[in-house]
């Protein structure tokens, strides 16, 4: 049985497999270990990063099942989904740390020493040019990416870097196909950043500036 069909049968034994069509495509257009699903009527196309080709079928089934739950807007949990979550939470161990930047590295080191006792493993560090997204953390490549709009504000840069470091520390919680990245523990530690409320206001200021730039009202 094909991968998607097996994932479907194990997740929805009460549904009729013959009513649906499935396709899996591996693509180099995605960042490592990213994926999405496109649905048209009863036809589902799963697009997976080519990195998934060599990963255990059991883990891939967990990924596909998580995407299926989004499409069908249902809640469920399987052993395969648990395997997928475990894989993603521990993927950083095997990822090479070869991408860095002197400015971001200084920000990371400052923040690591002040808030993590210097114990948090250094990730890949990179800039991006988006002003809509100030920072992000990619589990698949173990990369913190920071917007260049923060280059002139080292204090705010440290705060955004800190936020993304918390994603590395706490990973995510998953239950019944729903994933939470900003848990209560995450938010409590985020507030421990010095002048965190002021930093949030400054971020909102950037948001207002962005809205004016793009004509949002």
Image (cartoon, rainbow, N blue to C red):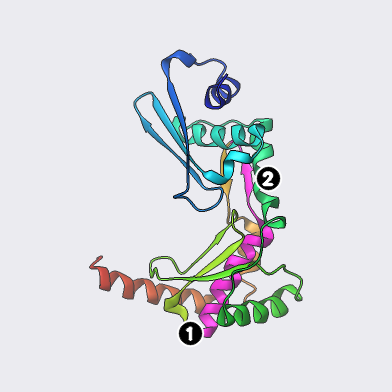
Looking at the rendered image, the disc whose residue lies closer to the viewer, 2 or 1, is 2
Q: CA distance from mark 2 to mark 1?
A: 36 Å
Whichever of callouts 2 and 1 sits on the residue coming sooner in the sequence is 2
Residue at left offset 58%, top offset 54%: 181
Quadrant where the C terminus sits is: bottom left
Number of residue marks? 2
Residue at left offset 42%, top offset 20%: 20
Q: Nearer the viewer, residue 14 or 97?
A: 97
Q: Which residue is mark 1?
A: 153
Residue at left offset 53%, top offset 84%: 154
Q: Nearer the viewer, residue 204 or 21?
A: 21
Q: Nearer the viewer, residue 10 or 207?
A: 10
Locate residue 122 relative to residue 74 in the image: left or right.
Answer: right
Give the magenta part as a residue range.
153-176
Locate residue 2 relative to residue 71 in the image: left or right.
Answer: right
The location of residue 171, given as percent across then percent down, is 65, 55
Q: Residues within 10 Å of mark 2 (few under 14, many from 20)?
A: some
Q: Is residue 129 above or below residue 21?
A: below
At numbered mark 2, what does the secondary structure look like: helix, strand or loop? helix
- Magenta span includes 156: yes
The location of residue 72, given as percent across then percent down, is 46, 29
Q: Is residue 89 above or below residue 113?
A: above
Q: Is residue 137 above or below residue 177?
A: below
- Magenta span includes 200: no
**Which corner quadrant of the image does residue 65 belong to?**
top right
Q: Main secondary structure of the magenta part?
A: helix
Disc ID at residue 87: 2
**Which corner quadrant of the image does residue 38 belong to?**
top left
Q: Is residue 36 above or below residue 195?
A: above
Say if residue 126 shows up in the picture: yes
**Which corner quadrant of the image does residue 192 belong to?**
bottom right
């Amino acid at each position: 049985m094909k991968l998607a069909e097996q994932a479907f049968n194990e997740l929805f034994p009460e549904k009729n497999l013959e009513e649906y069509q499935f396709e899996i495509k591996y693509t180099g257009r995605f960042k490592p270990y990213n994926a999405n699903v496109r649905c048209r009527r009863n036809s589902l196309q799963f697009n997976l990063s080519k990195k998934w080709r060599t990963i255990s079928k059991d883990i891939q089934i967990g990924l596909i099942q998580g995407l299926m739950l989004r499409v069908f807007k249902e809640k469920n949990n399987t052993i395969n989904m648990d395997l997928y979550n475990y894989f993603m939470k521990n993927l950083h161990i095997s990822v090479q740390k070869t991408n860095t930047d002197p400015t971001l590295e200084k920000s990371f080191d400052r923040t690591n020493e002040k808030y993590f006792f210097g114990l948090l493993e250094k990730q890949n560090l990179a800039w991006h040019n988006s002003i809509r997204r100030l920072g992000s953390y990619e589990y698949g490549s173990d990369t913190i990416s920071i917007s260049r709009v923060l280059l002139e504000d080292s204090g705010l840069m440290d705060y955004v870097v800190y936020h993304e470091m918390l994603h590395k520390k706490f990973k995510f919680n998953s239950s019944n196909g729903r994933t939470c990245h900003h848990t209560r523990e995450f938010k409590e530690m985020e507030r421990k950043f010095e002048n965190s409320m002021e930093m949030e206001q400054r971020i909102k200021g950037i948001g207002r500036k962005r809205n004016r730039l793009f004509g949002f009202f």
